[in-house]
Amino acid sequence: MQKVLNLFDLNQKVNFRNEILAGLTVAMTMIPESLSFAILAGLSPLTGLYAAFLMGIVTAIFGGRPAMVSGGAGATVVVLMALAASHGVEYLFAAVILAGIFQMLVGLLKLGKFIRLIPQPVMYGFLNGLAVIIFMAQVAQFKIEENGIEHWLQGTPLYIMAGLTLLTIAIVVILPKFTKAVPSSLVAILIVFGLVYVLNIDTKKVIDIASVQGTFPPFSIPQVPFGLETLKVIFPYALVMAGVGLIESLLTLNMVDEITNTKGSSNREATAQGLANITNGFFGGMGGCAMVAQTLVNVGAGARTRISAVIGALTILFIILIGGPVIEQIPMAALVGVMMMVAVGTFEWASFRIINKMPRHDILIGMLVAIITVILHNLALAVLIGVVLSALVFAWESAKRIRARKYIDDQGTKHYEIFGPLFFGSTSIFMEKFEVNNDPQQVVIDFKESKVVDMSAIDTLNKLTEKYRKEGKKVHLRHLSSDCRQLIKNAESVIDVNIIEDPTYKVMP
């Protein structure tokens, strides 16, 4: 019994009303998105709903972040669109399973901690770009397709949908000022739904996207040849999907950590995401990852435990099996309004306030990540570029900070006390600090306030000591780590190393 309590976080005080209502709201907002992404990828609408249920239930129970919501996210589906188009849906299921295996390995090998290496400007850019994508996806709902041609709503249908959307937004904004007893987004959906039903208003509904009725997800092994050729086809797609899914999921985990001032487990979440995707592949789901918008809806509605995500997943299953006819009549305007407010909440408005207060390169990196996210819809690529650029900027700034304090002691020995890291970016500046021709016969280079970081640094020390050797001068390298001494071979005969314990830095678990 205690294990069950721990699993669902019931050892803490739980507001069951908030959890249940938040779960219902999440389910309502997840359905149209899952349907849209499935249709976008050329898949059966049920493939998207199955993914929403399977991802939701598995990660809710086994994930590393209570209150986080996973489902059939567009970020991962976009990766697999080309595979489904060229080889069919069975290859897509196989790729989803392989991606799940990759994700589980990341979790089991405890590599999820490296998400901490993503800088704050990249996080800002990621969230801002994602907010724009969410908002633009809702704007696209103001289009309809007739005779295979897509065009914008016009006239009365446009005015009706715009009016209902504005009504939804107004309810979401105003209701919390009076009461937070129930999620304002759920109230907005119910009021707009009731208004359309009672007044028999003709407007775009969920049924206009696709039917949401079906059966329990059936178990099936992907019908693909089991061999190296299949692996060659699905491997690159699975690898990219695993990366995209983990980046979006772990960034979402960090975001919820900040909002709730609690700590989630990135490794456990990575393992759960992998298990969920493996389950998807065997039960006809299109795969997915954490969903930022739905997670924000969930947390904003007051959810803090796994119960809300479980309720959301079970609600989707109920809708698939029984409640489809009702859900299909929900006006899209209500869902569009809720998701637009989610986009507004996702956007980091603080990034405008700090634009003149933060380093210029951080601002530019954040903007670049946002632009790439919006233009390419590739969250993994955007984050990767942001991290690489941040690392290069850090290397450049660190390289400029290396310096040396010089003095000659009473015995005539010249001392160079090095400050700052010695690595590939700072080796040139480091070499410029020394006056080999003018230095006395005895030279001491002290690394007490420095750290020899990489092979480029060690090679530079080799070259420097070789220069002194050719001048017939002896160099003493003090406070240099033992691993560096072992690698310095060419100047071994002239190096007198005074080894003091030098820590090896690791990323903490």
Image (cartoon, grey):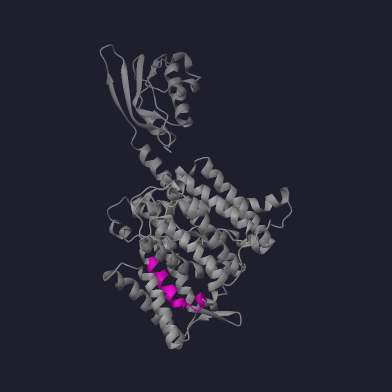
Q: Nearer the viewer, residue 446 or 63?
A: 63
Q: Nearer the viewer, residue 397 or 219?
A: 219
**Residue 333 lies within the magenta run:** yes
Residue drawn where x is 40% and y is 27% of the image: 503
Q: Going by the image, does 452 lie left or right of 214?
A: left
**Residue 387 lies within the magenta run:** no
Q: Give percent across and percent down for residue 342.
A: 39, 66
Q: Quadrant of residue 93?
A: bottom right
Q: Nearer the viewer, residue 254 or 244?
A: 254
Q: Going by the image, does 497 lie left or right of 94?
A: left
Q: Nearer the viewer, residue 161 or 496?
A: 161
Residue drawn where x is 48% and y is 45% of the image: 267
Q: Quadrant of residue 162?
A: bottom left
Q: Quadrant of residue 24?
A: bottom left
Q: Give percent across and percent down for residue 191.
A: 39, 78
Q: Is residue 505 visible?
A: yes
Q: Give percent across and percent down for residue 243.
A: 53, 51
Compared with 198, 121 (above or below) is above
Number of residue marks: 0
Q: Is residue 36 visible?
A: no
Q: Quarter of the image for the C terminus: give it.
A: top left
Q: Main SS of the magenta segment?
A: helix
Compared with 164, 508 (above or below) is above
Look at the image and give the residue range highlighted in magenta: 326-343
Q: Give percent across and percent down for residue 59.
A: 50, 54
